Amino acid sequence: MRTVDPQQPVVILGGFLITAEAYEPMAEWLKHKGICNALVVPMSRLDWLLTIWRFGWRRVLDRVDDIVKQVQHHSLSGKVTLIGHSSGGVMLRLYLSDEPFEGRIYAGSKRCDRLVTLGSPHQAVRATPLRAMVDRRFPGCHESDVDYVAIAGKLDLSSGNASAFSRRGAKASYQRAIDDEGCLGDGLVPVESALLTGARSLIQDDTAHGGLFGDIWYASTQRLEAWWDFVVGSESSQDKANS
């Protein structure tokens, strides 16, 4: 595992149609753990709807870039940790690259040395064009100086944690992602899609994709503490959970 300051600033980018308020408890929890700055990228539902187009992605990544540069000034290491939930994790892979996108070169890997993704659909048979572009142009752990950590969730659809929404829609979501409705996933994203090739990875049991999918999800304290301890304390680059 690369040496990364566990107390360096954190910038959180959420998932599609989820507003920033859902991640504020995570940011506060990280601050209590000693993180000097933990900020959530402000996103409205309209902001997310615009991401079906390239200019919408640029609007989001410009916002990420502004916040990263803001908190970098308070970083003793000079670096920042990125956390991306769902689509946010895929978009941050693009942010790390030094290749041009819509007239901008973000080169986020010069300022960020760790990316943690939570239930991000990294690989999918029927990915949206922009997500597919990211996986094609920046496969796996594309930036060699970045510690990539992928967290996936397994949700038992018959458990009390799974919402009615998950029970109705999970199999169709899994089918769209990897052509296997019987696979394991977090109610939206299959484990296979969320585990980025080459990244340090952790699979969390009884973990839903978001609040719509179950009461306990990646940002819930019951799961947050475990995956954060894995992020900052694991000595292995291999998957620590059984497939």
Image (tube, rainbow, N blue to C red):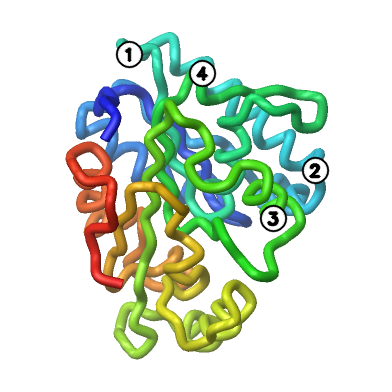
Q: Nearer the viewer, mark 2 or mark 4?
A: 4
Q: Secondary structure at mark 2?
A: helix
- Position of residue 172 relative to residue 113, above or below, is below
Q: Type of residue at label 1?
A: Ser
Location of residue 89 in the rendering, given as x and y in whole percent from the top left corner:
52, 47
Q: Nearer the viewer, mark 4 or mark 1?
A: 4
**Which residue corresponds to mark 2?**
54
Q: Do the residues bearing badges 4 and 3 touch, measured as CB atoms within 8 Å?
A: no
Q: Amino acid at mark 2?
A: Arg
Pick the residue in front: 223 or 202. Answer: 202
| Up-down relation of residue 39 to residue 164 (above or below) | above
- Tell me how far mark 2 sits from mark 3, CA to CA: 13 Å
Query: In the image, residue 229 lies at what x, y percent?
Result: 20, 44
The answer to whether mark 1 and mark 3 are in CB contact below 8 A is no
Which label sits in the foreground, 1 or 3?
3
Instruction: Give amino acid for label 3.
Output: Ala
Label pair 2/4, CB-CB below 8 angstroms:
no
The residue at which mark 1 appears reads as 77
Spot occupied by residue 166 in the image (x, y as percentages of width and height):
48, 80
Image quadrant in which the C terminus is located: bottom left
Residue highlighted by disc 3: 132
Residue visible at 51% across and 25% down?
109
